[in-house]
Image (cartoon, grey):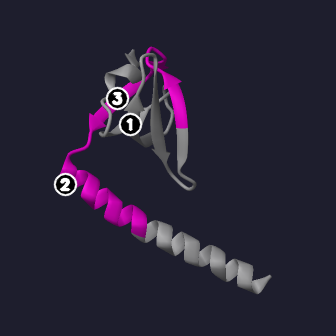
Amino acid sequence: MYTYGLMEAGNYYLVREYEHGPIQLFQVMMHSDKCFLFQRYGIPIELEWRMLNDPLHEIIECLSEDQVKQWQYCFRSYEDAYLRSEDADEEED
């Protein structure tokens, strides 16, 4: 069993919080003495605090800088398409 405290600030990680749970992308924003703040990527993006010793099922991998750049390109393209779709829905109402 892993803990959130094993992840380093500034890095992006693929993690599974619970057994058989979805794989999620986290970016660790900062650590305090007992907690850390991370960003969970999805629609919408969420910020969340966790205790450093809270259990985490699995840290799958830490992404390299090149992998992060590739992901950012894909995510921004998807996010733009999603937001344009929402704008079109609002115009129809």
Question: In this figure, which residue is indicated by the disc labeled 3?
Answer: 59
Q: How far apart are marks 2 and 1 (CA)?
A: 17 Å
Amino acid marked by disc 1: Val
Taking 16 as reference, is 88 above or below it?
Answer: below
Q: Would residue 15 be counted in the magenta stretch?
A: no
Residue at (41, 40) in percent of width and height? 26
Taking 81 as reference, is 40 above or below it?
Answer: above
Amino acid marked by disc 2: Asp
Taking 23 as reference, is 71 above or below it?
Answer: below
Left or right, 80 with reference to 91: left
Question: In this figure, which residue is indicated by the disc labeled 1?
Answer: 28
Location of residue 93 by image quarter: bottom right
Rendering coords of residue 80 (x, y %): 48, 72
Amino acid marked by disc 3: Ile
Rendering coords of residue 14 (x, y %): 36, 39
Q: Would residue 58 be counted in the magenta stretch?
A: yes
Q: How far apart are marks 1 and 3 (CA)?
A: 13 Å
Location of residue 76 by image quarter: bottom left
Question: In this figure, which residue is indicated by the disc labeled 2?
Answer: 66
Between 37 and 23, the residue placed more toward the observer is 37
Q: In which quarter of the image is the N terminus?
A: top left
Between 13 and 49, the residue placed more toward the observer is 49
Which residues fall within the magenta stretch?
Answer: 48-76
Q: Give the mark, 2 or 1, whose residue is nearer the N terminus.
A: 1
Taking 51 as reference, is 41 above or below it?
Answer: below
Residue at (27, 60) in percent of width and height? 70
Instruction: Assess whether mark 3 and mark 1 are in contact (beta carbons under 8 angstroms).
Output: no
Q: What element carries label 1?
A: strand
Left or right, 91 with reference to 67: right
Residue at (49, 17) in percent of width and height? 54
